[in-house]
Structures are given as C-alpha cells and as structure tokens.
Image (cartoon, rainbow, N blue to C red):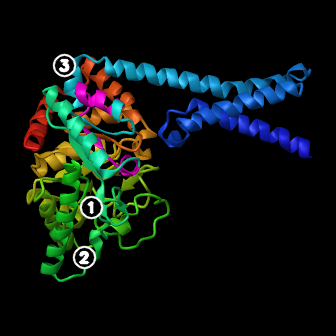
C-alpha cells in the first residue's frame, strides 16, 4: 500500500509541477517566479534522476517511461514560458516611439524592478507607476523617494509629461504604505460623528495622507471608497474586497460629506483623489479579485442611492473615477462596467457630463483576467477609459500593451476617443 501510494503521489505531483510550469507567467502563480521557479525546476530534475537511478527507464511498462517524461516537462514548459515572455517584452520595448507614446499614456503599472520600470518610463511606454507594500518594504522611505525622483527626472529628460505615481492609501485595512507611513483608521470610523466634526476629521485624515504621500513623491491616491456599506457584512465569496469594512456608510449624504472633506485634505498637498468603485460593490456578493460579479439592482434604485455619492463628489471636486469590474445587468449584461461603453460613455460621460480621468480597477483581477483580457483592454479604451491599471502583477503589462498595440495596428482603436483622452490626461496631470 505504501508503494502504491508513493507511485500515485509521484504522478499527482508531476502533473501539478507540469501545470505550474506551463502557467508560470500567470498572475495566480506570481509567488512561484524567481527563486520559486528555480526550486520547481531543480526538484523536477532531481525526481527524474531518482526515477532513472531506480530503474524506471529500463522497465517494460510504458507508464514508467511516461512518468519520467512527465517530470522532464515542467522544466521544458518553464523555459518555453520564459522565452515567450522575453519575446513579448522585447516586442514592446521595440515599439515605434510614436505608437509607444500614444498607447503608453494609458497604462499605470505596478513594479518590482527599478531598472525594468525605468526603461518603460523613459521610453514613454507607461504613464505611471503604482507603488505598494513590497516597494517600500524592500528599502527605506528615503530610498523609495529617491527612486521616484529619479524616474521623474527621466521623464523630464525625455520631454514627456510628469509620471503618475499612484498608491492605495485609504486608511483601515487598505493602507498599503503603512508602516512606515502613519496608520490611520478607516474613514468609516467617522461616520457616526456629528456632521461638522466628521468633516473636519475626514479632512485631517486627507491632510495626513496627502502630506506623507507628497513627501514620498506620490501624486495620486486610490481613495476614497464611495461604495455604500452593505446592509449585511455577510458575503459568500468575498476574500479580498471586504467592502463592508472599507465603505464609509450606508447613508449617501454621509458618504458624500466624508468623501469631499477627505479629498480637500489630499488636494491641499497636491495629491489627486480617485473615487471608487463605480458602479458600486456594496450590493455585490462575490469578490471581483477572483470571480465575475453581477449587480442586478434596478437602475432607479442605484440612481437614488448608490450613485449619489459618486455624482456629487465628482461634481464637487477634481477627483478621478475608478471603474470596477462588476457587470451592471440592467444596462450591459454582457460586459463588466470597466469596459462597457454603455456605462462609461453612456452614463458617466454623457448623462453625468463627467469629463475627468477614468481609470479601471486592476486588470489583473480574476473578474477580467480570467476572461478575454485583450478584448477588455480594447473595449475600455474605446469606451473612453483614460488609464488602464496593471497593479498586482506588473509583468502582465507586456501582454496588455501588446493587445493594445495589435488593435492600434489593425484599426480597432477609436482614434477620436484616444484624442479626447489625451486632452483629459493633459488637463489633469500637466500641473503636477
């Protein structure tokens, strides 16, 4: 029995290693890259040697040789995946400068390697960077500040617009740069205070975040959250969004007051705000980090409650808007909001007359990436989205840029939309 169990485990682990080798470039296996990939390849080679030494190759049963071949494949698959990634990366880096600047102004990218992102910044292949916990954990605050300043210098030297430097510093459970930045409670802790008090406290929160982010070189904060707090915190499939802990209140007026005050605090230090996650996650029961999600609420109900903070805050500030990956079934049941022309152009641009910058939520999230992310990139740009966020796994930028470049080459991008977007981006970031 022990021998049989061992053989079964060898087959199962071999299959698992092969799956990992084939998919090593996918976001959900990001933790296996680098030293993880080396360990994966080394282990597969060790197992092959072990099997050969124990005579599996000389056995008559064909399954014994197939088992050895199975354990050879993970290393081959990883080499193939690495080669494919390098070819894709080389093609992006060799993009014609004119096309690179036209498309690059729409990408904000997370990164780990300074040298790699510096090349993208200098060539104008991206508009901005997204910094998070791992960027600040690997070095001192001063070192990160110097790194950001060096990237801005490269932009100026290349005659390009200032680099967008974004962070996710809401307070509470989403405080990706704390520590070393000040750890503040969520804005929701202010909701029950008297009106004047909560507005002052919210502005103070914004000023603290604005001062510290500006000192670091960050000029855009992905906050505040304007989703209404759900009536119940229970969600069957919410592992990362946790909107019940992040939303300010279930009352639209309270959300608007706190949101506007917080934005004033950010503005006082020149840090832009990004309100999120339209069309709202408060009524959604699944987590768009991993799954598709539908918002089935009638449009009249959304207009009367959930959307009031978004409309009022956008009208009363210079905030940008982040579009989430929820499918609004009453308007466009076939597309998540982040690349729905009916929602972005039809509602936000035309009905609300919002002419500020719109950015997608992270395109590496499962609700988008597990489907046709190439189509999502093209449709988002054609729907008048200005910035495409590639945050969790910045290496996916090369794939998504390639999608946009191919669409541009074959005339599938709306040039009128791109020109309008260029105007909005210049208006929003030129002064930064």
Neighbour tally class for label 2: few under 14, some 14-19, many 20 plus, Cα within 10 Å: many
Who's the residue at 43% across and 50% down the image? 289
Q: Which residue is mark 3?
A: 98
Label 2 SS: helix
- Kindly check if marks 2 and 3 are in contact, taking CB atoms under 8 A apart as contact: no
Q: Which residue is mark 1?
A: 225
Asked whether residue 274 is in view, the answer is: no
- Kindly check if marks 1 and 3 are in contact, taking CB atoms under 8 A apart as contact: no
**Placement of 88 over or under 40, stated as above or below:** above
Magenta segment includes 113 = no
Q: Which residue occupies the foreground of this view, 268 or 375? A: 268
- Kindly check if marks 2 and 1 are in contact, taking CB atoms under 8 A apart as contact: no
Question: What is the x, y in percent for residue 276?
Answer: 26, 56
Q: Closer to the observer: label 2 or label 1?
A: 2
Q: Which mark is residue 190?
A: 2
- Residues in magenta? 116-137
């Amino acid at each position: 029995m022990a021998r049989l169990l061992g053989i079964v485990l060898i087959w199962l682990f071999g299959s698992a290693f092969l799956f990992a080798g084939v998919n090593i470039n996918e976001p959900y296996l990001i933790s296996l890259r680098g030293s993880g990939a080396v360990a994966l390849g080394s282990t597969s080679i060790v197992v092959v040697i072990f099997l050969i030494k124990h005579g599996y190759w000389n056995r008559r049963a064909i399954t014994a040789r197939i088992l050895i071949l199975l354990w050879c494949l993970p290393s081959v698959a990883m080499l193939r995946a690495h080669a494919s990634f390098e070819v894709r990366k080389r093609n992006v880096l060799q993009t014609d400068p004119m096309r690179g600047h036209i498309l690059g102004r729409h990408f904000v990218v997370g990164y780990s390697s300074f040298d790699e992102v510096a090349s993208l910044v200098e060539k104008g292949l991206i508009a901005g960077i997204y910094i998070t916990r791992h960027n600040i954990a690997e070095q001192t605050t001063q070192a990160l500040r110097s790194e950001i300043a060096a990237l801005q210098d490269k932009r100026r030297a290349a005659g390009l617009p200032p680099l967008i430097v974004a962070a996710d510093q809401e307070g509470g459970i989403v405080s990706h740069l704390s520590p070393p930045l000040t750890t503040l409670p969520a804005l929701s802790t202010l909701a029950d205070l008297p009106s004047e008090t909560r507005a002052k406290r919210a502005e103070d929160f914004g000023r603290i975040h604005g001062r510290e982010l500006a000192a670091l070189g960050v000029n855009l904060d992905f906050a505040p959250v304007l989703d209404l707090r759900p009536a119940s915190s229970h969600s069957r499939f919410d592992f990362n969004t946790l909107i019940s802990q992040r939303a300010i209140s279930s009352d639209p007026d309270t959300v608007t007051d706190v949101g506007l005050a917080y934005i004033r605090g950010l503005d006082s230090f020149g840090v832009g705000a990004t309100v999120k996650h339209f069309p709202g996650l408060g009524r959604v029961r699944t987590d768009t980090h991993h799954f598709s999600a539908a918002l089935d609420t009638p449009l009249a109900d959304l207009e009367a409650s959930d959307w009031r903070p978004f409309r009022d805050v956008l009208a009363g500030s210079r905030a940008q808007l982040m579009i989430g990956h929820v499918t609004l079934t009453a308007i466009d049941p076939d597309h998540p909001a982040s690349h729905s022309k009916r929602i972005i152009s039809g509602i936000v641009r035309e009905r609300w007359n919002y002419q500020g910058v719109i950015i997608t939520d992270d395109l590496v999230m499962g609700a988008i990436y597990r489907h046709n992310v190439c189509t999502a990139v093209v449709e988002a740009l054609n729907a008048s989205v200005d910035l495409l966020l590639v945050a969790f796994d910045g290496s996916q930028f090369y794939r998504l840029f390639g999608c946009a470049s191919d669409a541009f080459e074959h005339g599938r991008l709306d040039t009128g939309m791109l020109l309008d977007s260029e105007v909005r981006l210049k208006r929003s970031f030129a002064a930064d």
